[in-house]
Image (cartoon, rainbow, N blue to C red):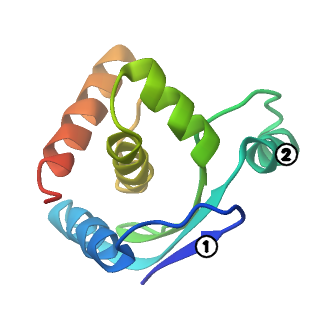
Amino acid sequence: MIDFNYETDFLLDDEAKISDWIGNVVKDEGCTLEEINYIFCDDDYLHKINVEFLQHDDLTDIISFDYSVGKNIQGDIFISVERVADNANDFNVSFTEELHRVLVHGVLHYCGYKDKTDADAKQMRDKENHYLSKLV
């Protein structure tokens, strides 16, 4: 089950389509979808979480809390729509494209992908691009 929650005025277009897409990503990665909660918020909201839970005093676009057990995927994914908008501008892509990338990025972490090394980051980006191409 995928739930979308809003702590800001932003509303996701076509929740059902995004939910089906994310479900297919999880399935294609050989995992089982238990529960993912997406929480859309602003920079201040996500910054407070970053400081309180991760002791990081900076802005970020996404924070995920992974409660998965083995290949049973579950967790909470917090997304700052302000940061996504800024990043879209910085990367010269549409807000929607950057949002979709962030949505799938969090799930790929749950499926076992990392992005701390250059090689891992490249693999993550390749996976993101692969799944972005499937969202039509």
Q: Residues within 10 Å of mark 1 (few under 14, many from 20)?
A: some
Q: Residue at x 73, y 41 (%)?
A: 43
| Viewer-proximal residue among 47 and 136 | 136
Q: Residues within 10 Å of mark 2 (few under 14, many from 20)?
A: some
Q: Position of residue 38 (x, y in %)?
A: 54, 66
Asked where in the image residue 34 lies, by quadrant, the reply is bottom left
Which residue is under mark 2? 48
Q: Is residue 116 visible?
A: no
Q: Position of residue 42 (x, y in %)?
A: 71, 49
Q: Residue at x 34, y 73 (%)?
A: 14
| Viewer-proximal residue among 68 and 121 | 121
Q: Quadrant of the C terminus?
A: bottom left
Asked where in the image residue 93 lies, by quadrant, the reply is top left
Name the side, left or right, on which 12 lies relative to 112. right
Q: Quadrant of the N terminus?
A: bottom left
Q: Is residue 61 above or below residue 121?
A: below
Q: Residue at x 17, y 58 (%)?
A: 135
Name the side, left or right, on which 30 lies relative to 37. left
State the CA–CA distance, disc 2 to disc 1: 17 Å
| Viewer-proximal residue among 99 and 47 | 99
Q: Residue at x 81, y 43 (%)?
A: 44
Which residue is under mark 1? 5
Q: Is residue 125 above or below residue 98?
A: above
SS class, disc 2:
helix
Q: Residue furthest top?
A: 118
SS class, disc 1:
strand
Q: Earlier in the sequence, mark 2 or mark 1?
A: 1
